[in-house]
Amino acid sequence: MSKAGQRVLSTLRQMIISGELAAGERIAEIPTAERLGVSRTPVRIAFRALEQEGMLIKLEGRGYRVREVTPDEVAGAIEVRGVLEGLAARQAAENGLTPAQRRGLLECLAWGDELFDKGYVTEEDLEAYHDLNKRFHALIIEASGNPAIGSAMQRNEHLPFASVTSLAIDRNNLKQEYRRFNFAHMQHHAAFDAIDRGQGARAEAIMREHANATLRYADLFAQQDRDESEMRVIGGVAAL
């Protein structure tokens, strides 16, 4: 998918999560493209991807309907992904990394360090994170040496937010997104360290928790932002 297509896809995910696109609402290519200021092609591709992810339902005629996604459904899909990726990390640690796998994971970590070390992120940075994140997770699954994990994940990916590529980004709050994705990147470092040291149980626990990082933690960091906005400075001292 092109960068423009990825941007549209992420934007539509966020609109569904926030309720800007309400459950049951009918959407079509042309008005959506006009609303987002893009051509129809990236919208068409994004609609198909969101249908596969279980967030849109294709109508018999033209257009799609926003599917109602419950918190329990999202939580269940993420938990299953965490179990599968945790198993992959444990088996990768037990098997040991090949030189190529180790080099690939280190390249992902270095790429992420470059994105986050400056203390903020741009939309382009988060698009780059999407690519490195996808590669990092794919390398761990490959290193597990267990093809059944990849097959199980493919079957799970039709559920909302079950795919590692299903990132929703709030472009109106990049400060929050910096915190969220930088935290997820630090978990990448911890997961690699555990795998590289052959610490299977630790690697599994980190990856299971990591499945929560890019979605559920959005609420945590959003709450932090709300708390900060409620503070005022009096005589150089922050007060609630």
Image (spheres, helix red, strand yellow):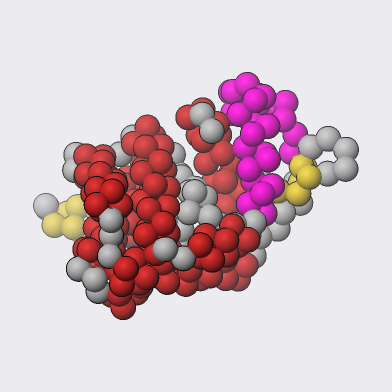
The residue drawn where x is 69% and y is 47% is 51
Q: Is residue 180 left or right of residue 16?
A: left
- Does the magenta run of residues contain 32? yes
**Main secondary structure along the magenta-highlighted residues:** helix
Q: Residue furthest right?
A: 61
Q: Position of residue 200 (x, y in %)?
A: 30, 74
Q: Is residue 24 above or below residue 8?
A: below
Q: Residue furthest left?
A: 236
Q: How many marks?
A: 0
Considering depth in this image, is 168 or 237 the residue closer to the camera? 168
Considering depth in this image, is 147 or 126 the residue closer to the camera? 147
Q: Which quadrant would the C terminus be assigned to in this image?
A: bottom left
- Does the magenta run of residues contain 64? no
Image quarter for residue 42? top right
Q: Is residue 104 above or below residue 6?
A: below
Q: Is residue 81 left or right of residue 107?
A: right
Q: Position of residue 95 (x, y in %)?
A: 32, 68
Q: Position of residue 198 (x, y in %)?
A: 24, 71
Q: Position of residue 119 (x, y in %)?
A: 21, 43
Res 236 visible: yes
Image quarter for residue 209? bottom left
Which range is magenta? 27-55
Q: Is residue 173 above or below residue 189?
A: above
Q: Is residue 2 above or below residue 105?
A: above
The residue drawn where x is 68% and y is 40% is 48
The residue drawn where x is 33% and y is 56% is 184
Res 213 visible: no
Q: Which quadrant would the N terminus be assigned to in this image?
A: top right
The residue drawn where x is 45% and y is 44% is 170
